[in-house]
Image: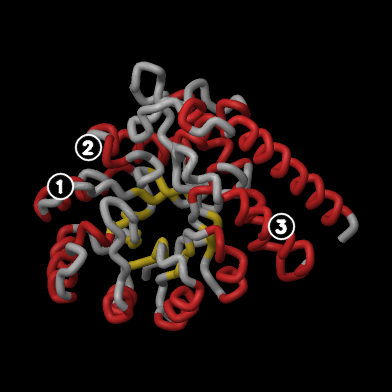
Amino acid sequence: MTHAINGIIPVMLTPFSELGEIDWNGYEALIEWYLANGAQALFAVCQSSEMQYLSLEERVALATFTAERVKGRVPVVASGHVSDSPGEQRRELEALVDTGIDGIVLVTNRLAAQDDAAKVFRHNLDALLMALPAEMPLGLYECPAPFRRLLSDDELRYCADTGRFALLKDVSCDLETVIRRIALVKDTPLGINNANAAIAWPALRAGASGFCGVFNNIHPDLYRWLADHGARYPTFAEELATFLVLAAQTEPMGYPKLAKRFHQRLGTLDSDHSRVIDFDIRERFWGVEPVIDRLLEGTEHYRARIRELMATA
């Protein structure tokens, strides 16, 4: 029986050197930072990892390295099927099987085109289910690139009823949809893990299995506190949730390079090099450094508030 993979799940960055090669020392430091800051699972080889710009060998190496360094402390899942051809996708996913990860995540826009009928989705999904080991837990990811393909209710229930899926990274960005999906997968191993910061707190209160948004690369511990303790402190939780929503609105300022620059400031990474964002975000977005200042200050402010609150609990 597949067990749920849930909680606060960072979508992992891939650090690069200034020469554009994977910075393995930086990646190891980043793994430890995630774990020290409340991550309950790690999602490697995803869009935040710049998976469309990684070779298959690099994707496999990232998945292997993550599993080896985590050493079972939390579950590790990975995706990375980026090809259009179903045969190539199968090859990409099969390459992940022996990397030591705890689950493989299927990207919904790779399983069917935007306007394809449900039968195309099921045909392609069934072919992958046959190819992947039955004991390997699976996930689903409504990745917004190159286009967002949301699962229909019937498709979601079909996946849930297989018993093989542990995780949906929900990118509907709609609370009503999240709530409906939670009900649809009730009594199955499949958890609905919201990825949208704007609805993170209400989605958690509604029964979402966690949060898997990009700002888990900035302050995953604050989302973890909301999930673990927010219900006991509703007034403060609402204030914290407002800060988290507003902080996440900086994503268009060159993410994932924005998050890498944040980690440069922390000392986790040496470089903010990105294959996706090939420009200097400080030149494109003139106010980005003061914004990062405020992200750092606001994060530390709320960490201090939480320490004070929990000390009196």
Which quadrant of the rendered structure holds the N terminus? Answer: bottom left
Residue behind mark 2: 56
Q: Element at badge 2?
A: helix
Instruction: Please name the amino acid that badge 1 sits on.
Output: Arg
Q: Element at badge 1?
A: helix
Relative height, residue 207 to residue 292 (above, below): below
**Is residue 230 among what the camera can see?**
yes
Q: Is residue 301 left or right of residue 245?
A: right
Asked whether the beta carbons under mark 2 and mark 1 sit within 8 Å of each other, the answer is yes
Counting residues from the start of the chain, the first of labels 2 and 3 encountered is 2
Badge 1: residue crowd in 10 Å (few <14, some 14–19, many ≥20)? some
Residue behind mark 1: 91
Instruction: Please name the amino acid that badge 3 sits on.
Output: Leu
Residue 32, percent from left and from top:
56, 36
Mark 3, mark 1: which one is toward the viewer?
3
Between the C-alphas of marks 2 and 3, the distance is 39 Å
Counting residues from the start of the chain, the first of labels 3 and 1 encountered is 1
Q: Nearer the viewer, residue 278 or 200?
A: 278
Residue 3, percent from left and from top:
43, 66
Which quadrant of the rendered structure holds the C terminus? Answer: bottom right
Q: Element at badge 3?
A: helix
Residue behind mark 3: 240
Instruction: Please name the amino acid that badge 2 sits on.
Output: Leu
